[in-house]
Amino acid sequence: MYPEDRKYSKEHEWIKIEGNIGIIGITHYAQEELGDIVHIDLPELGKEVKQKEVLAVIESVKSASDVYSPVSGKVIEVNEKLREKPELINEDPHNEGWIVKLELSNPEEYNSLLSAAEYKNYIGS
């Protein structure tokens, strides 16, 4: 359920690295806790974020929840499909439901994140 080719934050985001680009989304656990997602506020292209800063806001039928950046970087792409189909995050949180792509400004931060096994242990599954 939690792909081994990425790392996870204690705030329930995942990041997959491709070169100097990080693809970021929320975990299966996070989307289950949120319930049915009805809207997402995506960041502006070019926005600079630091590790653990708010990157996006997800609204579900239950509540609104901040998405925190697991690493520092610059937003270079957002998942435009989510504007029309935010439920993609519920349907496929680790693939089609990705949220943003960041150009990493401090790749070392990736090493501070949890492996899939560590994350599963952290959420108690």
Image (cartoon, rainbow, N blue to C red):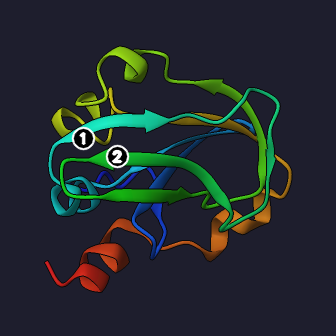
Q: Where's residue 21, x and y in %? A: 69, 36
Secondary structure under badge 2? Answer: strand
Q: Which mark is residue 59?
A: 2
Q: In front: 59, or 95?
A: 59
Q: Is residue 68 above or below residue 97?
A: below
**Residue drawn at x 49%, y 69% as measured from the top left:** 9
In the picture, measured across the screen, residue 50 lies left or right of residue 123, that is: right
Q: Is residue 6 above or below residue 29?
A: above
Local packing at callout 2 (Cα closer than 10 Å; few below 14, some 14-19, many 20+) is: some
Q: Where's residue 20, x and y in %? A: 76, 39
The amino acid type found where label 1 is placed reads Ile
Q: How far apart in space, not on screen, are marks 1 and 2 (Cα)?
A: 6 Å
Q: Where's residue 72, x and y in %? A: 77, 56
Quadrant of residue 51 within the rendered picture: bottom right
User: What residue sits right under mark 1 in the picture?
Assistant: 37
**Residue drawn at x 37%, y 56% as measured from the top left:** 64
**Residue drawn at x 31%, y 84% as measured from the top left:** 122
Going from the N terminus, do you reach mark 1 or mark 2 first? 1
The amino acid type found where label 2 is placed reads Glu
**Residue drawn at x 25%, y 74% as measured from the top left:** 120
In the picture, measured across the screen, residue 93 lies left or right of residue 58, that is: left
Q: In front: 12, or 65?
A: 65
Q: Which mark is residue 13?
A: none
